[in-house]
């Protein structure tokens, strides 16, 4: 199976399955002498951890990180960093009844067609459980970016038809929906109670914001910064669309409205989303990421089995009614690793360019 490595210089390679013994990662290309310990990574992992409210999956995983290599006396050594999280709360028996049935909306059908086999226990490698190691890698990238005054944050701005009236990313720690508008919490509580009774799920939209990135990061043509960021977001489970800046709204804008006028103190507007010609311009980078509803719901449905016979299906197990509730730290992590990788690439080529215009 290919496609398990992300990045060019700062590289993350992950391994492990949802119901396997452990999830693991190797990070290569991390700069040396960066202060790092398990607690720094654990803080990010705890944001993603399942079972923290009644609105997310009740799988109880402590997600305790172990650093196996690449750190000595509290600092990175520049050698590969080995990371491990042991799975503790697998319930593979929940999948015994449907092991030969292909779940609609999942990768069961495509994995079987591609590999001729599949791990039916929670989706195996296709499970969102895999993203735990992305968060671990992102925590390290964030640590490095913070020394450059680059900040990456995010929050849910829409669930179903419920939209944030005003966006305050500091609000997400004050409610169980990671929602960027606390005034919507009561409405969301009522909505999720109704959703639970209907045994259904819902989609979400998340804002990821990059602040403090210097101008000049990214490359034109095939490695545009916006293209690399879009790829990093689209590689996350359930993501179906990514918008930058004014996004699809540009369809209704005129050129005179869309272009960001340049003043002595910077850009007057930010319709470009902080990127021009595939290169950062110094403004905030705003990514709007849309995630589909969870495909595993308890409603009975029809499907086919591995012999292509039509069968009844009812999915059991513990699933998120809205994957967006735990997706913010995952998307932040991917943005962090992408941005760090692009900075390292930029410094490799343009180290001698004076950008103090």
Image (cartoon, helix red, strand yellow):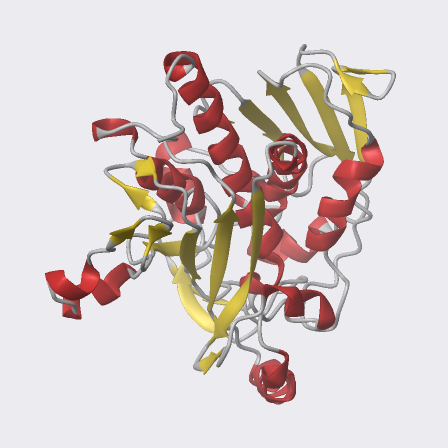
Give the x, y percent position of residue 326: 62, 58
Q: Is 188 positioned to the left or the right of 288 in the image?
A: right
Q: Is 131 positioned to the left or the right of 3 in the image?
A: right
Give the x, y percent position of residue 209: 49, 53
Above or below residue 164? Residue 63 is above
The answer to whether residue 213 is visible is yes
Residue at the image point whose x is 48% and y is 46% from the top: 236
Q: Residue furthest right?
A: 73
Residue at the image point whose x is 45% and y is 36% from the top: 214
Give the x, y percent position of residue 29: 57, 16
Q: Is 114 positioned to the left or the right of 132 in the image?
A: left
Quadrant location, the C terminus: top left
The answer to whether residue 87 is visible is no
Give the x, y percent position of residue 266: 36, 49
* Residue nearest the viewer, comparing 50 with 111: 50
Above or below residue 102? Residue 58 is below
* Residue nearest the viewer, comparing 226 with 315: 226
């Amino acid at each position: 199976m290919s496609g398990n490595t992300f990045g060019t210089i700062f590289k993350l390679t992950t391994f492990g399955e949802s119901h396997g013994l452990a999830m693991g990662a190797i990070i290569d290309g991390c700069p040396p002498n960066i202060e790092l310990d398990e607690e720094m990574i654990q803080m990010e992992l705890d944001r993603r951890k399942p079972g923290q409210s009644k609105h997310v999956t009740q799988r109880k995983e402590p997600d305790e990180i172990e650093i196996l290599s690449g750190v000595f006396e509290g600092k990175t050594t520049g050698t590969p960093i080995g990371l491990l999280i042991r799975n503790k709360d697998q319930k593979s028996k929940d999948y015994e009844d449907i092991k030969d049935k292909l779940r609609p909306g999942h990768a069961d059908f495509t994995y079987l067609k591609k590999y001729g086999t599949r791990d039916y226990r929670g989706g195996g490698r296709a499970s969102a459980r895999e993203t735990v190691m992305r968060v671990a890698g992102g925590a390290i990238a964030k640590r490095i970016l913070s020394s450059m005054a680059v900040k990456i944050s995010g929050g849910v701005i829409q669930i179903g038809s419920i939209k944030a009236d005003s966006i305050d990313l500091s609000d997400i720690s004050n409610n169980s929906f990671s929602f960027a508008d606390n005034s919507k919490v009561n409405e969301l509580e009522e909505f999720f109670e109704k959703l639970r009774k209907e045994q259904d799920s819902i989609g979400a939209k998340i804002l990821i914001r990059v602040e403090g990135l210097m101008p000049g990061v990214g490359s034109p043509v095939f490695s545009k910064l916006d293209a690399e960021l879009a790829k990093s977001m689209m590689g996350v489970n359930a993501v179906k669309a990514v918008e930058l800046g004014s996004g699809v709204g540009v369809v209704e804008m005129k050129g005179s409205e869309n272009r960001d006028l340049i003043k002595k103190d910077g850009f007057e507007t930010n319709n470009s989303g902080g990127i021009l010609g595939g290169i950062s311009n110094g403004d905030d980078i705003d990514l709007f990421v849309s995630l589909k509803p969870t495909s595993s719901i308890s409603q009975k449905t029809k499907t086919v089995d591995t012999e292509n016979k039509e069968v009844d299906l009812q999915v059991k197990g513990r699933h998120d009614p809205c994957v967006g509730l735990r997706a913010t730290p995952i998307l932040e992590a991917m943005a962090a690793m992408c941005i760090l990788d692009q900075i390292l690439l930029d410094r490799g080529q343009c180290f001698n360019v004076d950008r103090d215009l």
